[in-house]
Amino acid sequence: MDDEYLIPEPRSSDIGPSRNVAFRRDSSGIQDHGHVIDAPSLSHLVSEMVRRGLIMVPHLQELRVLGFANTEWQSLLASAEMTLCELALQPSAYNLTTIDLQLEMSTRGPNNCLSSLVEVTKRTIKLKVLRIRSGPKALSQYRIPTEYWAPLLKQLGERKPPFKLHTLDLDGLATSKVAPTLDRIVAAHSCSLRRLVLGHTNFHYPNTLYAFFSALAKSDVSYFELSWLFLHHKSLLVASSLSFAQVPDEVLKMGVKDLRSDCDMSNYDWIVIRWDVDRHDAAVVYDNEDGFYGQDWIKRCCQNALTSIECGAIDDS
């Protein structure tokens, strides 16, 4: 493994008896018993694994730390602050093209997680993929306004950022009153950005959906996914689709008269309109990575979103 270092997901069998913290496993029902874990020691172990990996592979290109934030007990096994501090201290981290982290990064209380990440990424001029996914504690607080993400947003939105991203995937993001808006970030990376994923996002002014979808329409993004977007401190944005089908008069004359019980045969045609609204936890996905829908399909989807904002179907105030 010359160019990739993967920290595996913790399993219950990896955790031996200890003295510190007692936790129950998640409520999936797979194994309903308690665990007693020495969380600080295991957290130090994970950060040491990251440090040793960076030393042993001086030209490391991809770093993924995954599975340490699926549940609360797993999030105790890896400290985001310690892991990111190790990254900032190791020169070999500056060769990374992929940073993929799934760690608990609670936005409440002081910590240096994002500041340490910015110290790393300001020198990773080859960085193409940035995935930061927070844990259950941070996600439960994502609707609370915070400037925790401001350092990273400032870097991503620079006029000349130190790197050009192909993939940006953020979960647990809170936009900022002082840092660049998401539309500026999309514009800053528009020449290279192809995948954009936003989950559990606190989206508020000075960000606006109109500016965001306008920037997205001008980019060459071929995959866009959005879920749990808390809009302007008051509502969740959900996916919906408005469709219509024209039924010609000839079809009615052939005997299909059950479209309406009182259908008037003198009408030239019928238009059946449907407005389907997804569940609040369903993701909005624009996927055209294979080019199946044509070159400008996502641009047209963004234009439809802009039309919805202009006509008031989506409240962007």
Image (tube, helix red, strand yellow):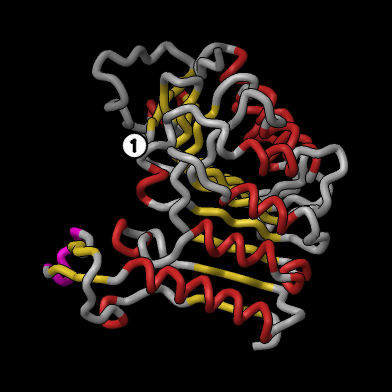
For the residue pair 5 and 18, the one nearer the viewer reads as: 18
Q: Position of residue 93 (x, y in %)?
A: 72, 69
Regarding residue 303, the answer to whether it shows in the image is yes
In the picture shown, does residue 89 fall above or below 1? above
Q: Residue at x 67, y 55 (%)?
A: 167
Residue 188 is drawn in which quadrant? Answer: top right
Residue at (38, 31) in percent of width and height: 277
> Which one is in front, 187 or 157?
157
Taking the view exactly as shown, the residue that stands out farthest to the left is 32
User: Eyeballing the image, is 223 above or below 202?
Assistant: below
Which part of the image, by quadrant, shows the C terminus? top right
Say which of 159 and 73 sits in front: 73
The quarter holding residue 280 reads top left
Q: Residue 274 at what x, y percent from top left?
A: 41, 27
Left-right relation of 234 to 4: left
Pointer 1 residue: 279
Q: Main secondary structure of the magenta part?
A: loop
> In the displayed structure, does residue 257 sit left or right of residue 297?
left
Q: Residue 192: where, in percent of width, then height?
A: 80, 52
Element class at badge 1 = loop
Rate crowding at label 1 as few (under 14), some (14 to 19) or many (20 or more) other CA atoms within 10 Å.
few
Left or right of residue 75: residue 157:
right
Residue at the location (46% across, 61% down)?
Answer: 79
- Taking the spot 72% from the left edge, 74% from the top edge, the residue there is 61
Quick one: quadrant of the N terminus?
A: bottom right
Specify the amino acid type for callout 1: Arg
User: Can residue 245 be spotted in the picture?
Assistant: no
Q: Please state the horizontal and vertical placement of residue 163, each as a whole percent of the image.
A: 81, 54
Which of 258/232 is in front? 232
Magenta residue span: 27-32
